[in-house]
Amino acid sequence: MKKIFLVVFSLLLLASISYAQDAEKDMKKAARYLSSYNLDPAANPGKLQESYQLITSALNDTIVSSTSRGWILKGKILNELAAEEVKKKLIDPKYVITMPDAATEAALALKKGIQLSVKKHEAKEALTALLDTENHLNNFGIYAFQEKDYKVAFINFDMAADVYLWMKDNESEETSRLADPAIRSEHFFYTGIAGFYGDNKADAAPYFEELYKNGSKEPFVYEALFSIYESDEEKALVYLNKGRELFPSNSGLLFAEINHYVRKGEMEKMIDKLESALEIEPDNVSIYTTLGSVYDQLCTKATEADDKEKAKECFDKSLSYFNQALKLEPNYFDAIYSIGALYYNSAANMTKELNKYANDYSKEGTKKYNEIKSSMDALFDQALPYFEKAEGINSNDAGVLQALSEIYARKNILDKAQQYKDRLDSIQSK
């Protein structure tokens, strides 16, 4: 039994040694193929891919993967593969990169090479190769950013920033392109944007925070930080207020502030901000419609408080802003619908007062009832053409169909009322 065990053990040992020797041979062959490719790329186009396959296989061996040589070689091979992709992209901008992870894999391989380095020249070799990797990461990030693939752009830009930090840790940062503060700020800015729009706001935040700390002159830095920390209102407002202070005429920051007050329902503050926005963007239809909506809400509040004078003032201002929006865009759905809703809601608000006289059959009570009903019907009639026009623009809007159904029912045109109700039911059942 002991002899059998020794035989088996010996066979396993021999197999292990044989595999390690094969892995070492593959690594050396990969190095030769890379050299052949570098000497004459045109004559040896296939050698690069072969060298990549060989080194990938070799690094599966625990002995080869425990030393820096294999990882540094892998990083260099991937650098060349990334460079090939960049060349093809320069020749043909429509070229689709086939190895999108080449630069990031190169960076990780070279980082591993630095970590496993025993001799100074090994670390130096890896750090030198990282300079090429850094450029490839930047290029890959730019290509992805231009194609609005913000997730991939962020991965590459973020890794390039990591490379700078690795070089800094090894006292070689002066050779990095990001050693220049201006280039580093620009890189951090676009890395932050890529993360922000690539649904990775949490990882984008440190880049924007670094830029904020250094007094960035980019308004979006402040807007982004406000958005990222929106759940922490106190913290978010610090960024927003600083941005508004530095860039009072920037529309992005202004609208961020407006939306903040919209969510909080602070109408009076919103009006001031929106009127400021009109000075910057007098042809922005959405500002007029937002102002119209704000005054519409104030009209409703005044009506509920039985302040008829205030309600009338807010109604007129709301209508004016919606009409100004239509002067800019005659078929702007939101403004058309909103005017219809303004008249409709004003009519509906009279129902409570009308009901006071519903059972009053005295001469005075009947007169008052008829006066209120006449005014209410007139408002519904004024709402009707706006809802009909809105329906012509968007025939499947539930709010429009419901309003039309109810108005026609009030006018006792029951067949049309039923048509709109049936369409509404059909939409809501889907």
Image (spheres, helix red, strand yellow):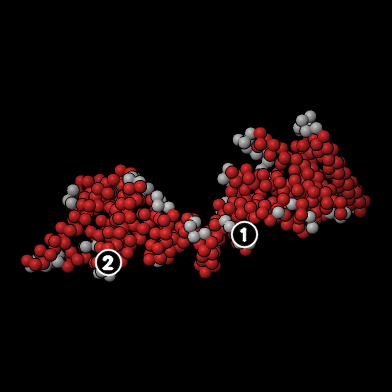
Horizontally, residue 205 falls left or right of residue 413, namely right
Q: Quadrant of residue 76?
A: top right
Position of residue 298 relative to residue 75, above or below, is below
- The one nearer the camera, 64 or 136, is 136
For badge 2, the amino acid type reads Lys
Query: Outermost residue toward the right?
Result: 3
Up-down: is 239 above or below 43?
below
Residue placed at 78% from the left, 33% from the top? 41
Q: Residue furthest left?
A: 363
Residue drawn at x 68%, y 39% is 86
How far apart, in angstroms, are the residues tagged by discs 1 and 2? 47 Å
Pick whichever of labels 1 and 2 is earlier in the sequence. Answer: 1
Where is 348 relative to 108, above or below?
Answer: below
User: Going by the image, does 324 lie left or right of 384?
Assistant: right
* Label 1: which secondary element: helix
Q: Residue at 61% x, 51% y: name it.
A: 190
* Circle 1: residue type: Leu
Instruction: Say what secondary structure mark 2 lies in.
Output: helix
Residue for badge 1: 211
Q: Position of residue 146 (x, y in %)?
A: 59, 43
Side of 425 relative to 283 (left or right): left
Q: Nearer the viewer, residue 142 or 219?
A: 219
Disc 1 residue crowd, few under 14, some 14–19, many 20+, Cα 10 Å: many
Compare residues 250 and 259 and report the one nearer the observer: 250
Residue found 27% across the figure and 66% down from its top: 310
- For label 2, count other residues whose C-alpha is less than 10 Å away and answer few (under 14), some (14-19) or many (20+): some
Question: Is residue 338 in view?
Answer: no
* Residue 235 percent across, percent down from the top left: 54, 67
| Labelled disc at residue 310 | 2
Indicate left or right for 292 with 364 as reference: right
Please tell me in which quadrant of the rendered image residue 359 appears: bottom left
Q: Nearer the viewer, residue 11 or 343?
A: 343
